[in-house]
């Protein structure tokens, strides 16, 4: 059974710092991995999706990497801003033995606070 | 991308009552899902809403407690029945992907507090 772990659970940094959020998963048989942002009491906003054949994806100040063989992904945030404060969720989409896809499996998230 | 709206955005309900949450998508989608996020926890899939047939429920969730409708390819409802304080959560509607390489999108959520 696929399990997703995110470390750290919470992170507080001063504005301007570059930071890395970590995600690990137990089964490397995945179709893709997706990073989401969730503001308090709100829904999820998709940030980046990495296909299993890709090593990384970039969007603005965000860069996500994927090492499928070791079951790890990182989300790098450059020059952090107070507006980046949110919970960041990692989710993997496993594939099953019949070659189809399974439903997303989520980590518990990393709560990021960027202090002015 | 898909734009998803949910109603209500939040509600406070009394124990023993029921609440129906609506999910509207701006385009036709095959896959629609309902998730629950309890305080301080990650997302748990409740069920997949199938158009024209009964929903498919995950382990630990039953139709009597969480009846779901999916009358067409752009709309679904989730009812939380006979509520208790343990049902206090954010309920999220989600759509996609139609192909495995696509992004899955989420609605803004419905924040429910049961007293």
Image (spheres, rainbow, N blue to C red):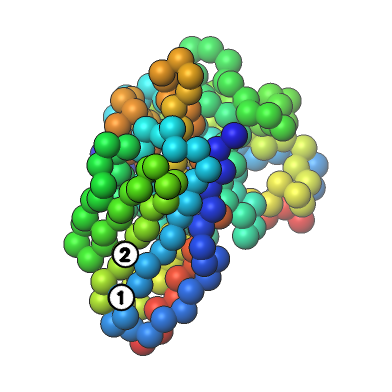
User: Numbered disc 2: what chain?
Assistant: A
For the point 26% across and 76% down, which residue is it?
Answer: A79
Quadrant into which the N terminus of chain A falls: top right
| Position above or below: A69 against B85 | above
Quadrant into which the C terminus of chain A falls: bottom left
For the point 38% across and 53% down, which residue is it?
Answer: A73
Same chain under badges 1 and 2? The reply is yes
| Position above or below: B45 against B74 | below
**Mark 2 lies on residue:** A76
Q: Is residue B42 left or right of residue B76?
A: right
Q: How many marks?
A: 2
Nearest the eye: B40 or A109: A109
Q: Which mark is residue A88?
A: none
**Mark 1 lies on residue:** A18
Residue A94: percent from left, percent from top: 46, 32
| Mark pair 1, 2: CA separation | 7 Å
Residue A103 in view here = yes
Task: Determine contact: label 1, label 2, CB under 8 Å.
Answer: yes
Residue A21: percent from left, percent from top: 41, 64
């Amino acid at each position: 059974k696929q399990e997703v772990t995110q470390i750290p659970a919470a992170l507080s940094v001063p504005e301007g710092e570059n930071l890395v959020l970590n995600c690990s998963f137990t089964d490397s048989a995945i179709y893709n991995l997706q990073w989401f942002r969730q503001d308090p009491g709100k829904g999820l906003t998709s940030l980046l999706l990495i296909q299993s054949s890709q090593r990384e994806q970039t969007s603005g100040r965000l860069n996500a990497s994927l090492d499928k063989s070791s079951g790890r992904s990182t989300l790098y945030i450059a020059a952090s801003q107070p507006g980046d404060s949110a919970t960041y969720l990692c989710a993997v989409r496993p594939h099953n033995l019949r070659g189809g896809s399974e439903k997303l499996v989520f980590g518990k998230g990393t709560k990021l606070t960027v202090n002015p | 991308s898909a734009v998803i709206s949910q109603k209500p955005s939040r509600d406070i309900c009394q124990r023993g009552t029921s609440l129906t949450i609506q999910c509207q998508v701006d385009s036709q989608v095959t896959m629609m899902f309902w998730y629950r996020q309890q305080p301080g926890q990650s997302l748990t899939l409740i069920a997949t809403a199938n158009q024209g047939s009964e929903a498919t429920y995950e382990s630990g969730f039953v139709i009597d407690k969480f009846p779901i409708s999916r009358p067409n390819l752009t709309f679904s409802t989730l009812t939380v029945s006979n509520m208790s304080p343990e049902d206090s959560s954010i309920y999220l509607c989600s759509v996609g992907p139609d192909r495995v390489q696509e992004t899955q999108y989420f609605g803004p959520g419905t924040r429910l507090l049961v007293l």
